[in-house]
Image (cartoon, rainbow, N blue to C red):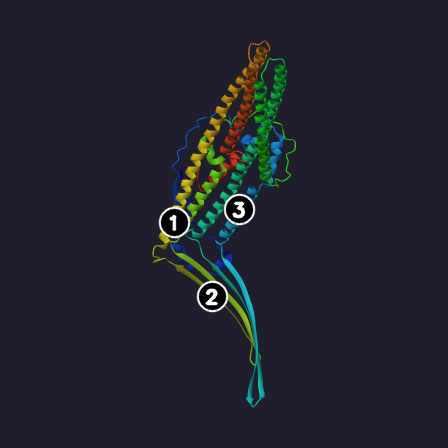
Amino acid sequence: MKKSFTVHSEKLPNKGLMSAVSASVLLALLSCVGGCASLTVDYESDIVLPENYTGFISGEKNEKALNEWWRLFNDDCLSRLIAAAIEANGDLRTARLRYETALHEEGLSRADLGPKLSLGGGILGGRGSVDTSGGRIDSTDSQSALFTGLQGSWEPDFFGEKQSRADAAGYRALAASDSINAVQTSVTALLARKYFEVLYLQERRGILLENIANLKDLRRYAEGRFRAGQATAYDITDIGNRITEAESELGIIDSGAEASVRAIAVLTGVPPQNFSIDNLPSGLPDGIPEPPAGFVPGDLLLRRPDILSKRNEINARAAMVASAKADLYPRFNISFLGQTGRIELHAGPDARGWGSFLSGTVSVPVFTNGRIRENIEARNSEMKVTLAEYDTMILKALKEVDDGYAGITAETARIAALEKGLSEAVKLRKEADKLFRYGRADFDAMVNAETRKLSFEAKLSESRYRRIGALIDLYRALGGGWNYEPDASAEKSTAEDGNEP
């Protein structure tokens, strides 16, 4: 991935000011800078993207579905919570304010490209007397003065020093804009994970309550058998111990669910105290969406907002390198001062007049004791650091996508095995009951069969929850969760000085 950043010098003429500058001065200034209109800074990433992911799924890409992946679950409650988070989340609000600040910083930098004009004026007055004969005033004089003036200055940016700084500010604003989307992808994924954690814990609680109810039924059955001499006191005590163990887990499950609800409250920007979720489903959804198909590693460079943000940071660093290099070249400054005024004298005629002053200066660095060179190297090192961070971010993103696909594949296989195991456990439970009734098995076999069935139900619920979590992580890793528009992104990428990923 070869990238280059070019800074073009811009002539920003001010008609009013230029009219006061003679043609000979302009020709002299422009002839000094002929052929020095741009600076180029090249940078290159070391990452070679693979053609496909390890878990690549062929098919047509659905960009719109990935933008709002939570709607694939067909859960109105989840969609409502995510909409509230996008509107009021504190981290998103902070990111938006940072973007607003970056826009003002860019505006300030671009304003520095133009001339500055200031208008001033003043008024003076005085009165005096002359004593020439022992306290007798011979004469009294008074005078006043009124003046106004216009002052202007302009530093033409022939070598792109100011333009580079403005470009850097522009890229920082783009990075801040991408950071908003990056925060949104993280917030939506985290909220969805917490939401499904609540549903999973509710489902797990239901399974546990079913387990407790079944164990209590078995205990009553054992007590009857004990009175008939067909069960032992050990059987009754063993079941009671299992009930106590199951009941002890209820508090932990409830505490975990409450913590997840509080986390959702914070993510939606409201105080967690007395927060509740209306119309919350009782368990995990029956239908889990299939993983996204058709996405390749190259899509990450345009879909992942954190990668886009880091790339714009690199562009900003490259612009600052170009700005530092511009210090090697001469600087020009044009100044203008025009004044007019009137002086009134009590004992003499009034005086009126005007004056103007125009200057053009050139400053050439002769000896800086290495300051310019060290500044260039420092800015270049900053760019290399950011580029290294960019490469690392891409590697981590590639890993996250493969982790997501691998997690989904593993949990899908586990779900199939657990569903088969649960079906077998249900049959085993029925067979154990028959064998016990006909005296072919002891009571412990029936209890163990019931426990095994409920264990499969709990593991199946956990595996479905883990698959949903892996799917959410994959959505986020692919850059889902923000309003990505492929055509707009392609135009944006082309416009950024030819910086193609």
Looking at marks 3 and 1 on the same chain, the residue that comes earlier in the sequence is marked by 3
Which residue corresponds to mark 3? 98
| Residue at 56 percent of width and 87 percent of height | 131
Q: Is label 2 or label 3 in front?
A: 3
Q: Secondary structure at mark 3?
A: helix
Q: Amino acid at mark 2?
A: Phe
Q: In front: 176, or 136? A: 176
Q: Position of residue 215 (x, y in %)?
A: 60, 21
Q: Is residue 51 above or below residue 306?
A: above
Q: In front: 66, or 471? A: 471
Q: Marks 1 and 3: in contact by CB < 8 Å?
A: no
Quarter residue 437 falls in = top right
Q: Is residue 360 above or below residue 303?
A: below
Q: In front: 307, or 16? A: 307
- Asked if residue 373 lies left or right of residue 192, the reply is left
Which residue corresponds to mark 2? 357
Q: Amino acid at mark 1?
A: Ala
Looking at marks 2 and 3 on the same chain, the residue that comes earlier in the sequence is marked by 3
Which residue corresponds to mark 1? 378
- Whole-number angstrom distance, CA of label 2 to CA of label 3: 43 Å
- Whole-number angstrom distance, CA of label 3 to CA of label 1: 26 Å
